[in-house]
Image (cartoon, rainbow, N blue to C red):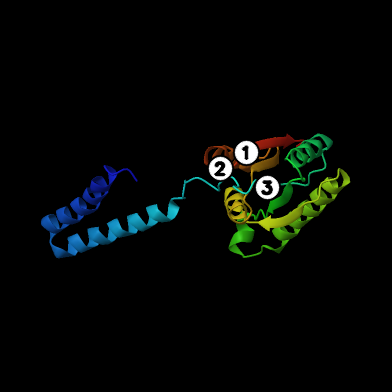
Amino acid sequence: MAPWKLPLVVIAIAVPIVAGFAAGGPGVGVSVGALVAVALVVYAARQRPRGAIGEPPVDGVTRLLVVVGRPVEDAAALAEIARDARAGEGDAAEVLILAPARIGFLDRWASDVEEARRRAQRNLVITVASLAKVGVAADARVGDEDLVQAVEDAVGGFAASEVILVAGGDDEEAARAARELESRLEPRFRCLLVGS
C-alpha cells in the first residue's frame, strides 16, 4: 500500500465513528463502529493478493508448466509443447501438466468435488498420453478450481521457467485468467488456443 493511503484509511474509519458518537451518543457511535468493522471485513475478504507469482528458476533447469482446462490432443498444440520441452540446453525440460478441477456453483456449495476432480484427471490422462506419443514425458497434477490460484500453487513447488495455458477460444474463464497471469507471472507466459 502506498504510504499516503494509510492516513486516508484511518480517517475513513475514525470520522464516521466520531461523528456517530457526537451526533447520537454512545449507542449510535458503537453502532456506526460496528458497521464500519463489518464493512472492513467484507472489503478485506473480497480482496485478492495481486503480487507477482513465482520466480524464474536459478538452477538453470528448464521447467515447463502446462495448464490445461480440456484434454490436449490438437497436433499443433502438442508439437508446440514438444518443441518447448526440447528447447532447453542439454537434457529435455521437466514438464508438469496441471488441470484445475473446475467446480460448478451448486457443486461447490454442496461440497461435491468428485466429478470435477474426475474430469480434471481425465484431462490429465489424455494430455499426458498425447504428449508421450510425441516423445514428451510429463508429470501431472490436479489443481485448485481457480485457474490463477492453481498456477500460483503449482509454481510455488515447481519453479517453472515457462507457463503455457492451453485453452479453447470460447473459454471466458481461461481468457480472464490469461490476462491476470500475463500481468502477474514472473516466468515467461503464453496462451495456446485450441479448437472450441
Residue 20 horizontal side relative to residue 106, left or right? left
* Sequence-first tag of 3 and 1: 3
Distance of mark 3 from mark 2, alpha carbons?
18 Å
Q: Which residue is mark 3?
A: 61
Q: As displayed, is residue 35 above or below residue 177?
A: below
Q: Are marks 3 and 2 in contact (CB under 8 Å)?
A: no
Residue 25 horizontal side relative to residue 158, left or right? left
Q: Are marks 1 and 2 in contact (CB under 8 Å)?
A: yes
Q: Which residue is mark 1?
A: 189
Front residue of 140/35: it is 140
Residue 36 is situated, as x and y percent measured from the top left of the image, at 28, 56
Q: Are marks 3 and 1 in contact (CB under 8 Å)?
A: no
Q: Nearer the viewer, mark 3 or mark 2?
A: 3
Q: Residue 185: which disc?
A: 2
* Sequence-first tag of 3 and 2: 3
Quadrant of res 157? bottom right
Amino acid type, mark 3? Val
Residue 69 is situated, as x and y percent measured from the top left of the image, at 70, 47
Picture residue at 26% right of the left edge, 42% below the top: 4
Q: Residue 19: which disc?
A: none
Picture residue at 62% right of the left edge, 58% below the top: 106
Q: Nearer the viewer, mark 3 or mark 1?
A: 3
Amino acid type, mark 1? Phe
Query: Considering the numbered disc 3 on the image, is that residue within a helix, a strand or a loop?
Result: loop
Quadrant assignment for the C terminus? top right
Distance of mark 1 from mark 2, alpha carbons?
7 Å
